[in-house]
Amino acid sequence: MSAVQWLASRVVLIYGIIFIFCLTCMDLKTVEERIKVRHLNDAIPDFSDMIIFSQDQNVKKEIDWAPYRDYFELILSYIPNDLITEQLLGFVDYYSGQEEKAVVLFKSSTDMKGKFLFWSNYNLGVLYYKKEMWPQAAKYLLNAISANTKLTLALMQDSMIYRQIVASPFFKYSLSDGISDAQSRSYILLLSCLHHMKEYDRMIGVANLGIENQRVSYKDAFYYYEGLAFYEKGLFKNAFLLFQKSMYMEKDNPDVYYYIADIFQKAGQLEQARELLQLSYALHQKNDPRFPYEARADLRFF
Amino acid sequence: MTSFLLIIPFILWFFCFRHFFTGHLNLQADAISYAEHIGFYTDNLSHGIFPLWDPTWFSGAPNDFFLRRIGDVNPFLFLIVLLKWFGVPSATAYLVFLGVYYFLAGWAFYLITRFLLADRFFAFTAYILFLFSSWGSEIFYNYIIIIFVPIIWFLYFLLCFSRTPQRASLLGMCWCAGLIVTTYIPFFFLTILAIFSFLYILFYRNECIEFINRSFKFFLKNKVFAGFCIIFLLISCTPALVFYKESKSGEFVLPDRHSGANSSSAVAVGLENVASGDIINHGYFDRIFDDHAHLDMGDIYIPYIFFLVLLSTAFARTDKLIYFLLFNILCLSLITITSAAGVHRFLYDHIIFFKFIRNIYYFFWLAMLPMGILLSVVTFRSLLTAIDSSSRKTIWLVYIFFCHLIFVLFLCGHHGVLWGAWAAIALSLCYFSVYFYADRKISYPAGFCLLLLAVFVQSAQVYGYLDDKLFQFQRSVAHSGEMHQGPQKTKLGLYYASGWFSALVDYIDPQVLDDYRKHPFIFYDNVIPYKDSTQIFQTLQATMAANTNIAFVSGAESRPADWKRSNDTLPQADLDPVSLGELSVSPADVNTLKLTAHLNNSRFLVINDNYNTGWHALINGRQARLLRANFAFKGLWVPSGDSSIVLYFSTLKRYMFHFGLIALFGGAFLYLLVLFKKELR
């Protein structure tokens, strides 16, 4: 009996048959693709915690970030460099204590073919702002305000992950409104950064941009910061007018009263100054979470 | 000896799943609804009622669909009835039934292996590999055990008949086939049988001709008996055929299952739906070597002895049986991978019953896994035969040690391998060492013990982890049930429901419909007809929400005499006639509704239990017109004065037919036992 004949009569041949069967009768590419889809489907987390956390970080303190991280990492293992996933994984990594990894992920998803994407730039800006690294924060916040929000929105709407997020019964928001709101906040944080960096002329420029931009809200804040820039430059008359504009739009900001009082004091009008200082103090006591404007600096994904 | 070999491993298997049997762990997934429907059926049966209508299922639905799923004529269901009579709680009785049924499956598997290999040891090996594979966990996860037991016993009877045609084997085959065809999913069996037969003809041509000759002679000799068997089989097909006809009537729907299907039958499945139920879509093989500590229900687990045997037997001699089993598995795998091979698409387009198979991955549990285990055991026999006949035993021993080493190295590359797995490998080595060095008087009984130990040690640990995981899941579900205060989607998710009720769910605001359904009986004074179109839903929703004194009946299904419009009526319908004393409800069974009305004027009664053409009404003993009211429910005019109203579902003929069929199956089963006892002698 030859070796071939001997081998042909052995069980090992059935392994060969199975191997050839797999190669010839099965579409292995389809099998692989479908297994990937199944793994992804199995890993889809319940987005409710992440949604609630993103809206108010005080409501959900202890979140198990592992299912989100596993899911996003799995997607990246199948689709490396997926910008939306990188941005979401960055968000998860940051809040699960892996800041360095988050920064790397945000940085690699800041732009698409030269066009700035909003969320990664915004989150990087906020992240550096919280660390008081003003120049870095200003750089990314500037990118955020000049980001292509339509492109960002289109990518989000096209993304399977955002579709899963939006399908959650806890998601009661609008993606475009979310971007507009965060872009308005970008202006505020950028103005605050520039204030810390003492770049008052740039502050005036950015504040005017914000005021002229029809899509962003918080105009009262932009008038306030522009007034602050003039105030720091010693141009109290301009500052006064701008603070007044801000005050007409938003009556509960204690800081604007403080600065107007200071201008009155500098002008020797002590009675008005004292009244305004009292008002400012009373408003401070209310602890309105909206003020100071720059206090709300949280990473977000919608 | 045989009973000892069967019972000891079964007790150990019972130990592995003890938490299910004691009720500490709940049934999972589809097993829950099957337990509920079997519970509903046996509860009614124990009261002498055959439940043709389920009033608890989404405002009422014909129960035939569930009866077809569970196989209502199965005499083993009487075990549950019997246990209940003895005071055993329903849940425990059902679990005992599951355990007994699984044991029956294992027993048949043992008998088949013993039949084919003519050796207790190999039959025992196959039995324990099957018993401790995750087939055992499947019985708590889905319902395929209900169809698997008759399939595997059918194959055993077929094998017996092929060797020596006897009355018992023929009746056994027909009885099992009958049991399968009374369900609405006999198509798994038909496919497995077709492939099995085709390959049998291909591989065993001569044996096949002999088999046909022998069978022919047997039929000629036993004409009356064979005729009885054929008639029995034909009668068995009746419930499934009636169900198929009813599935085309549109009176019930299965929205999710049916989506995308191009057949008028409600039970047909869309192609996309089939793909979601194929083998690729299930994570069966994800944890076959990895991470047994996180095994899930539905994951595949086979004790490692199976793989060690397959690896060690690579150079053992093959035979026809091995190839026969292999090609059976390969043919079925081509179907189960659906879109990854063109075979399923072809069958779906050209063979009608493939349009009714959704969970195509069941082929894995029903045939591929048992055949795979059988294949490994056949190769195992081949290996031991080769060792016995070899003059250079030491080379074989070294080779087997080498295979074990390779397997150990292979496992080292995987994560989460449990100590039970290493123990199983060590015990396997012990087995082979004993086989080589010990005397046959010692090695033969030691073989049983060592293999059982190897299989049990690994499985007990794996299923221990599975228990932990399920306990943890149960706790988290209970916890989230207490804590979860999130928004809730109130729209009902319908799996199976009356067609008209399903439309109501689609078009009427869930809250309005829910509030409306809280009133089981409503009296109206005005009845107006409508055209069956989606436009009615807006009006209907407004009427339901405002409780207006108007009932709607289908214009096409009613006559002008059924309609009434009067301005001289109260603006609102009477939502609670029972507390007002206008209506009293008498006790009745699930197929019947008995009411007594006391009215000053004739009024239209809407009973918020779904309408079905199978329902009939009698008022004071006379046939009354039952109408479809408020789109989905029952309605009828009740005359003034005292009226006795009786509504009943289906006909006496059908009712008796079902009882007759149960009696036929029970009788045939007893006859089968008698024949077996006689022919065994």
Image (cartoon, coloured by chain):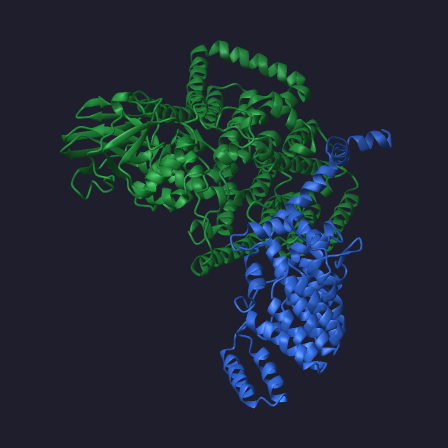
Return the residue nearer the eye: B565 or B183. B565
Image quarter (top left, top right, bottom left or bottom right) of the N terminus of chain A: top right
Residue drawn at (53%, 80%) of the image: A284
Q: Is residue B285 visible?
A: yes
Q: Between residue B7 and residue B345, name the one nearer to us.
A: B345
* Residue at x 47%, y 22% (from the top left corner): B174
Residue B67 in picture, x, y percent from top left: 40, 31
Res. A2 image quadrant = top right
Q: Is residue A251 left or right of residue B431?
A: left
- What chain is colored blue? A
Asked if residue B546 is positioned above or below residue A110 in the image, the reply reads above
What is the display colour for chain B? green
Quarter of the picture holding the C terminus of chain A: bottom right
The image shows residue B408 at horizontal and vertical percentages of 73, 53
Q: Is residue B462 left or right of residue B343?
A: left
Q: How many callouts does the rendering have?
A: 0
**Compared with residue B11, is residue B201 higher up or lower down, i.e. above or below?**
above
In the image, A249 versus A118, the foreground residue is A249
In the rendered image, residue B424, in percent from the top left (x then y), is placed at 64, 52
* Residue B61 left/right relative to A45: left
Residue at x 46%, y 53% (from the top left corner) = B19
Instruction: Name which quarter of the figure residue A9 lies in.
Output: top right
Q: Quadrant of residue B548?
A: top left
Q: Is residue B607 above or below residue A277?
A: above
